[in-house]
Image (cartoon, rainbow, N blue to C red):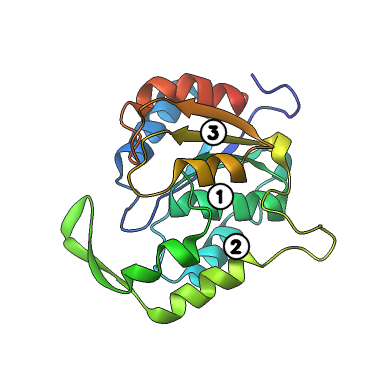
Amino acid sequence: MNHSLPATTHLLYLHGFRSSPQSTKAQLTRRWVEQHAPDVTWWSPALPPSPREACELIFQGTAAWPASTLAVMGSSLGGFYASWLSRRRGCRAVVINPSVQPARSLAGYIGTHPVWHDPSQQVHFAPEFVDELRALQEDLPADEPPGPIGHPQHLLAVLGTHDELLPFADMRQRYAACRVRVVEGGDHALSGFEALLPEVMGFLGL
């Protein structure tokens, strides 16, 4: 249980690159909320491929939510967005195998790709989106010193040691000041995430 803040009343889930709100982790989290915290406001939007547009949607969609009881969860690129929102709003965040240098890691994915959970759908990642990610990586509030994490005490990083897409060492270093839950043998999708949900939700006061 995280006693530093009151229980979460509004929960945002952000999917990763080539993913959707239908991802396994998003659906497991949604079902957990429905069963154990039905009064919590839940939102898991389909994020546009443009990082700038995605962050505008996230920021505007949660603008009326109270920062002290707002929490955001995100996986992979969604974890990068979750860290961005946490830094902006001062809210709690849970990041799952988060991308720490998305402009670098996604530079090789320019083009059109099928969505993981529905190959009939496609996502187009344009060259300018890399520049948008780079701008977001450098987008710090004027009153905050440079650094990757603005409110480390409000953030839990769930990291798989065998992530096949993102280097575990990079994630571990970036989130070293935060609470970290290392999942030995965990892959990028973090198979077995359901077993971690009670611990994750306890961090959010649920």
User: Taking the image as drawn, is residue 87 in sight?
Assistant: yes
Q: Position of residue 175 (x, y in %)?
A: 61, 41
Above or below, 114 relative to 189: below
Please say if the residues under marks 2 and 1 sit with CB atoms less than 8 Å apart.
no
- Left or right of 110? Residue 198 is right
Give the quarter of the image for residue 108.
Answer: bottom left
Q: Which of labels 2 and 1 is toward the front?
A: 1
Measured Cα–Cα span from mark 2 to mark 3:
19 Å
Above or below, 136 relative to 172: below
- Left or right of 140? Residue 111 is left
Residue for badge 1: 82
Which residue is depicted at the point 60% across and 60% down? 59
Residue for badge 3: 40
Q: Who is closer to the viewer here, 147 or 33?
A: 147
Please say if the residues under marks 1 and 3 sit with CB atoms less than 8 Å apart.
no
Which residue is depicted at the point 36% across and 25% down? 194
Closer to the chain start, of discs 2 and 1, is 2
Above or below, 9 relative to 51: above
